[in-house]
Image (spheres, coloured by chain):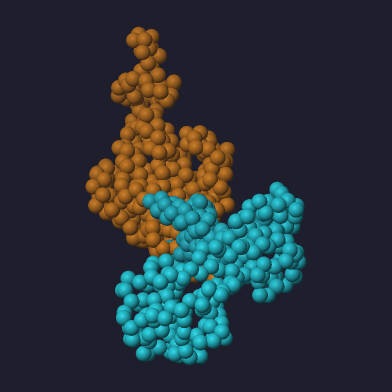
């Protein structure tokens, strides 16, 4: 879709019109007996002033650039391309996929955003109509089928879940009630339970009446004994779970903690996993997403905006200089 | 030989035109210079280019090996003054003959009169009113004076306005001797310092003859319609001519010239109104005849 800003192009006529100069009629003939004729006011007429044609050109260019900038002009210049999704580490696998799909000579573009299809939709106008696209790497399955003007071959491979362990500190007089919650886990993450909280701890379970050290700021606290956390008095409650954001971090507390049965422990664990960890993306199967006719290109890509802005600045400076020079 | 205005427009050689006009005029317009037996020899004068060969004293040439001219004529006591209005309005061109202006015409007529005066042996001088000033060539006789006057006439360009009354008054010192004044102008400014000066000269018993020059287009009000016009002597203001104002124009113009002619007649100044499209000899003859009758 063409941006509506292009309809502002007739604005270019303004400087052209202004560059016509008001001038007194010069074809005045001398007549000795003019004194016997009735006096009249000198007629004004507009004449073309082509002398400062450079200035006119600069002004028109300036306006055209402004409109192009507003309309977010995009020039289709990219050919076949391999889009590598962010977080793709296995380059050997990528090379293999590229060779298999027949994209050997294609440009390789590292997509800067995790939402690969969204980025592609915004930038799709930069590709020529006959360009082929290969999307490879850590591509997550979009919720709806992407509407793109180009057919896109997808070769996805889920990123391996990070092996970095999560540190959990249990400060409690009854650690045997808390520890089983983490020992029997089969999630793709590793949890390391410690007794002393430190800077690495992402979850601190505080089940003691005394206050925790002030410098301890994990992202989440599970509070077993609320006497050291006066903030919890005003906490909101959802499903028996009281939660509040404090200066120390997010506090969670529940009367039923530590969990007495397996179901309560599972609920607690799932709540924690759901709210504090990003979902593991699902890698779609290798497929070709066909071009859809209804693909809309109204999203801005801003690909040429920086260039146009520089051009605008240069043109503005030149216009000022030439205008000043012609006025002298 | 008839010099038409078109021929006049095609040459800048005033001398040539004057010869043509005078050839066409023939002799005997005025009483000729007295020559022959009864005339006393007054003096010898060194030959100057332009002097007639028959006036060279050949015996003296044989004796002195130099050319001398006998100044033997009795000179007329009447000085002839040529008055040329060379203000900007005299640059008015003829709308039918391209390249012809009132000034061109006026100076041709005055040059012819200078030639006649020179032929008759009268002293003649030139007054050119141009650019708020007066260029004054003192009256004298002889071919040198003729060339001087011709050069001044040829030099005259239409510019500026008429000189002020004071300027003219200070330049009227020639008016002591009785003289014959031929004034060529368009007389568009009346009353004006020029009119005052001419009337003053007339009151001082000088013989003043006026030639009022016009163009055919001015008379017929046949200018290009719907064009802006400007008065060459009044810088400001633009004037419009159209078929609707032609009648008013004619009326105003006639009223003005009626006033001019009436003032001249009242002061006994013979005035000839002439179109610059008319042939020079015809106008010249009419003017001289008019003057003769006056």
Residue B288 visible in the snapshot: no
The quadrant where residue A156 appears: bottom right
What is the display colour for chain A?
A: cyan
What is the display colour for chain B?
A: orange
Q: Is residue A191 above or below residue A304?
A: below
Query: Nearest the camera: B259 or B68?
Result: B259
Please indicate whether residue A289 sits to the left or right of residue B159 in the image: right
What residue is at 37 percent from the left and 29 percent from the top? Answer: B144
What residue is at 50 percent from the left and 65 percent from the top? Answer: A165
Residue A268 visible in the snapshot: yes
What residue is at 70 percent from the left and 61 percent from the top? Answer: A155
The quadrant where residue A185 appears: bottom right
Residue A163 horizontal/vertical position (percent): 55, 63
Please indicate whether residue B125 sits to the left or right of residue A156 in the image: left
Residue B4 horizontal/vertical position (percent): 56, 43
Residue A217 horizontal/vertical position (percent): 37, 72
């Amino acid at each position: 879709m063409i941006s509506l800003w292009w309809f502002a192009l007739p604005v270019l006529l303004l400087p052209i019109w202004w560059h016509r100069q008001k001038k007194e009629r010069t074809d005045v003939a001398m007549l000795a007996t003019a004194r016997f004729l009735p006096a009249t006011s000198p007629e004004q007429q507009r004449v073309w002033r082509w002398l400062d044609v450079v200035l006119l050109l600069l002004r028109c260019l300036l306006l055209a650039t402004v409109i192009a900038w507003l309309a977010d002009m995009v020039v289709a210049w990219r050919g076949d391309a391999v889009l590598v999704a962010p977080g793709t580490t296995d380059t050997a696998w990528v090379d293999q996929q590229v060779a298999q799909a027949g994209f050997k000579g294609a440009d390789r573009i590292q997509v800067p955003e995790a939402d690969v299809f969204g980025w592609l939709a915004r930038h799709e106008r930069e590709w020529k109509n006959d360009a082929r696209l290969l999307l490879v790497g850590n591509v997550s399955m979009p919720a709806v089928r992407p509407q793109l003007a180009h057919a896109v071959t997808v070769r996805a491979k889920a990123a391996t879940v990070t092996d970095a362990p999560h540190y959990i500190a249990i400060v409690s007089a009854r650690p045997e009630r808390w520890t089983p919650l983490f020992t029997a886990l089969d999630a793709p993450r590793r949890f390391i339970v410690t007794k002393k909280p430190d800077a690495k701890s992402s979850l601190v379970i505080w089940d003691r009446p005394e206050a925790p050290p002030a410098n301890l700021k994990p992202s989440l606290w599970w509070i077993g004994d609320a006497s050291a956390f006066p903030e919890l008095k005003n906490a909101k409650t959802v499903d028996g779970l009281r939660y509040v954001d404090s200066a120390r971090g997010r506090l969670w507390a529940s009367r039923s903690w530590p969990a007495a049965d397996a179901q309560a422990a599972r609920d607690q664990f799932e709540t924690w996993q759901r709210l504090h960890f990003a979902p593991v993306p699902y890698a779609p199967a290798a497929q070709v997403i066909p071009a859809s006719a209804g693909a809309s290109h109204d999203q801005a890509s801003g690909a040429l905006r920086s260039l146009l802005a520089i051009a605008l600045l240069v043109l503005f400076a030149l216009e000022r200089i030439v205008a000043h020079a012609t006025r002298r | 030989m008839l010099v038409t205005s078109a021929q006049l427009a095609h040459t800048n050689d005033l001398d040539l035109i004057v010869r043509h006009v005078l050839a066409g005029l023939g002799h005997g317009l005025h009483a000729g210079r007295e020559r022959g037996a009864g005339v006393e020899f007054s003096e010898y004068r060194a030959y100057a280019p332009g002097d007639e060969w028959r006036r060279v004293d050949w015996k003296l040439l044989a004796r002195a090996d130099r050319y001398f001219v006998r100044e033997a004529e009795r000179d007329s006591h009447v000085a002839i003054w040529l008055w040329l209005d060379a203000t900007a309005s005299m640059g008015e061109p003829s709308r039918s003959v391209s390249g012809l202006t009132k000034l061109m015409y006026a100076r041709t007529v005055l040059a012819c009169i200078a030639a006649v005066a020179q032929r008759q042996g009268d002293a003649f001088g030139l007054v050119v009113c141009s650019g708020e000033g007066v260029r004054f060539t003192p009256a004298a006789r002889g071919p040198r004076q003729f060339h001087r006057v011709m050069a001044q006439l040829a030099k005259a360009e239409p510019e500026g306005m008429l000189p002020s009354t004071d300027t003219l008054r200070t330049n009227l010192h020639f008016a002591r001797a009785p003289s014959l004044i031929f004034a060529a102008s368009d007389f568009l400014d009346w009353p004006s310092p020029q009119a005052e000066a001419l009337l003053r000269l007339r009151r001082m018993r000088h013989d003043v003859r006026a030639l009022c020059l016009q163009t055919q287009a001015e008379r017929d009000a046949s200018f290009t319609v719907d064009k802006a016009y400007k008065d060459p002597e009044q810088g400001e203001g633009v004037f419009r001519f159209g078929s609707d104002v032609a009648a008013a124009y004619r009326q105003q113009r006639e009223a003005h010239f009626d006033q001019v002619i009436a003032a001249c007649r009242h002061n006994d100044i013979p005035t000839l109104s002439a179109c610059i499209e008319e042939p020079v000899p015809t106008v010249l003859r009419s003017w001289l005849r008019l003057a003769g009758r006056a």
